Amino acid sequence: MSALTDEDYAITEGGRPLGALYAGNARAVIERGFRVIKSQNWIILVSGFFEPVFYLLSMGIGLGSLVGTVTGPGGAPISYAAYIAPALLAVSAMNGAIYDSTWNVFFKMHFGKLYQGMLYTSLGPLDIAMGEIFMALFRGFLYALGFTGVMGVMGLITTPWALLLVPASVMVAFGFASFGMAVTSYMKTFQQMDMITFVMLPMFLFSATFYPLSVYPVPVQWIVQAFPLWHGVELMRQISIGAFSSATGVHLLYYAVMILVGVAFTTGRLRSLFLR
Amino acid sequence: MTDAARTRLAAHAPEVSAAKARRWGSFYFAEHVLRSMRAYLVTIVVTSVGNPLLYLFSMGVGLASIVDRSAGGAHGVFGGVGYLAFAAPALLVSSAVMTSANEMMFPVMDGFKWRRFYYGPHVTPLVPGQLAAGHIMAVGVRLTLQCLVFFLIMLAFGAAPGPWAWLLVPIGVFAGMAFGAPLMAYSAHIESENFQFSMIQRFIVMPLFLFSGTFYPLATMPVGMQWIGWISPLWHGNELGRMASYGLSEPGWLVAVHVLYLGALGAVGIWWARRNYAKRMGK
C-alpha cells in the first residue's frame, strides 16, 4: 500500500455548479426533519393548525354578526368571515414559516449544534437551507390544506379558484421561510429573538387583516404596502373569490423576488458562519 | 471563636436571621424574582408599551372604523359607547391575563427543574409556601406596572371615559391572578415537560382571549359557545373592566358573580400552589 499524499486529502468540487455550497443532498436534511416530526413534535405541528381556525371562528362569527358585509376585492359585498378567512390563511402561512425557520433554527444552531454536525459531512450550506425551508413549506402546506377545508365547511368557498389558496399559501410561506433562517443567524440570545415577535405582531395587526387598508391615512398605507404580509393577504383575498387584477401580478412578483433574495441571503449567511 | 469575631463574620446571630427569614421570607423571595426579571427588562418594557399601542390602534381605531359604521350607536350593542371604548378595557385585562400566564409557566418550571433556583432558598429557613407567595407577589408587581402603563396609554387614546376608569389597574391584576395562580399550581406539579405549556398557550390562553367577549359582547356568540366565556376568568374581568371604564350597566347579582368567581379562582389557586410547592420541595 502506497502512502497517501496531500493530493488524496484535497477537497475537490467535482465540477458541478455551486459545488462548494450544494452537495445535491437536501433530501437527507428533509428526511431527518420527518423523523423528528414522527418521533417528537407532531403534536406541536398539529396544534399550530388551530390558531387561525380559532381566530376565524371568533372574529368571523362573533364580530361578523356585528359588521355584516364588507366590500370584497372585486367591489362586490362579501360576508366578514369570507373577508378575513384568506387573510388569516396568509397570517398562518407566515407564522408557521417563521416559527420553523427562526426558533427552530435558533435552537438547532446554538444548542443542538446540529448544522455544524451536518457541515462536517458532505452536506453544504445550501443543502441545509433548502432542507429546512422545505420542512417549513411542508408545514405551511398542511395548514393551508386544513384551513381551506375549514373554509369549505363554513361555506366560505364559492369559487373553484379557492383551491389555489393552497399553493399560494406555500408561496407566502416560502417568502418568509427563506428570510427567517438568515435573520436568525444574526441572533445570539433569546432576548434578540423577541425582536422577531416585535416585527411580526404589528405586521399581523396592520396588514389589512381585519379591516381594509383605506382606514389609514395615505402615508401609513404606503408603509403597510411595503410589508410582505400585506401582499400575501391581498393575494389570498383575490384568489378566494377569483377576482384578479393587475395588482395580482405585483403581489406574485413581490414574493418571487423575496424568495430569490431570501435563499441567496440564507445560503450566504450559513456559508460565512460555518465555512470560514 | 469569640462573640466579637462571630459578629464580624455574620450580620446577625443565626436565630435572628432565621426569625427574619420566617417573617419576611416571602418579600425576600419576591425581590429575588423581580431582580431576575431584569434579565429581560427590555422585552418587558417594549411589550408593556408596544402592545397597548399596537392593539389600541389596530383594533380600537382601525377595526372601530368598520364596526362603528355598521354596529355602533345604531342598536347600541356596546352600551352606548364607541368600539374603541368598548374594546380597550378588555384588551387591558387580556394583556394582564396573558402576561400572568407566561410568568406562571416557564419561570416556575425553571425554579423546580431547569435552573432549580427554588432549591437555594429552600435550605434556608424559608418554607415552600413563602417561595410560592414571593413569586406571586413579584408577578403582582409586574402586572400592576403593566396595567398602569396600559391605562395611561388608554387615557392618551381617550379610551377610558369614566371617572372610575383607574380601577382597571386593580381589576387587571385581580383577573391576572385569578388565571395565573391555578396555572402556577399546575406548573409546580409537572415533572416532565411534554409540550404542556405550548398546549396551554394554544388551547386555553389563546381561545380564552378570542372567546371571552374581548372583541364583541359575549351574547353575540351562538349560545353553544357562550359557556367558554362563563368559565373564563377573562370574561368576568372584561365585564368588571367595562363597568369601571365606561359604566357598563350590569345587574348586581352578576357583579357579585364576577367578583366571587375571580376571588375564588385566585384563592384556590394560591392555596393549591402553596400546597404543590411544599409537596414538590419535600421530594
Image (cartoon, coloured by chain):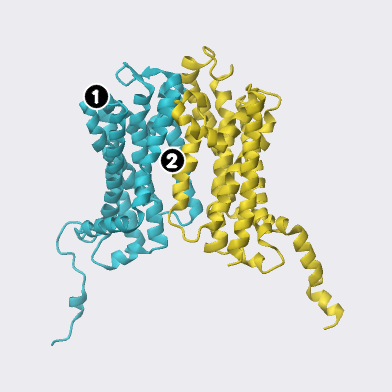
Chain colours: A cyan, B yellow
Residues marked 2 and 1, same chain: yes
Q: Quarter holding the N terminus of chain A?
A: bottom left
Name which residue lies at 34% across and 43% down. Answer: A176
N-terminal of the pair, mark 2 or mark 1, is 2
Dot 1: element: loop
Label 1 chain ID: A
Q: Position of residue B178 (x, y in %)?
A: 61, 42
Where, by quadrant of the figure, is residue B20 drawn? bottom right
- The amino acid at mark 2 is Met
Q: In the rendered view, tell whether residue A15 sits above or below residue A175.
A: below
Q: Which of A4 and B127 is in front in this view?
A: B127
Point out which mark residue A200 bears: 2
Left or right of A31 on screen, residue B94? right
Kindly check if marks 2 and 1 are in contact, taking CB atoms under 8 A apart as contact: no
Name the residue rendered at 46%, 20% in the picture: A66
What type is the residue that disc 1 sits on? Gly
Residue B12: horizontal and vertical position, in percent?
81, 69
3D distance between C-alphas at marks 2 and 1: 28 Å
| Letter of the chain that mark 2 sits on in the rendering | A
Specify whether residue B152 is in view: no
Q: Which of marks 2 and 1 is in front?
A: 1
Closest to the observer: B263 or A272?
B263
For disc 1, the neighbor class at 10 Å (few under 14, some 14 to 19, many from 20) is some
The residue where tag 1 is placed is A242
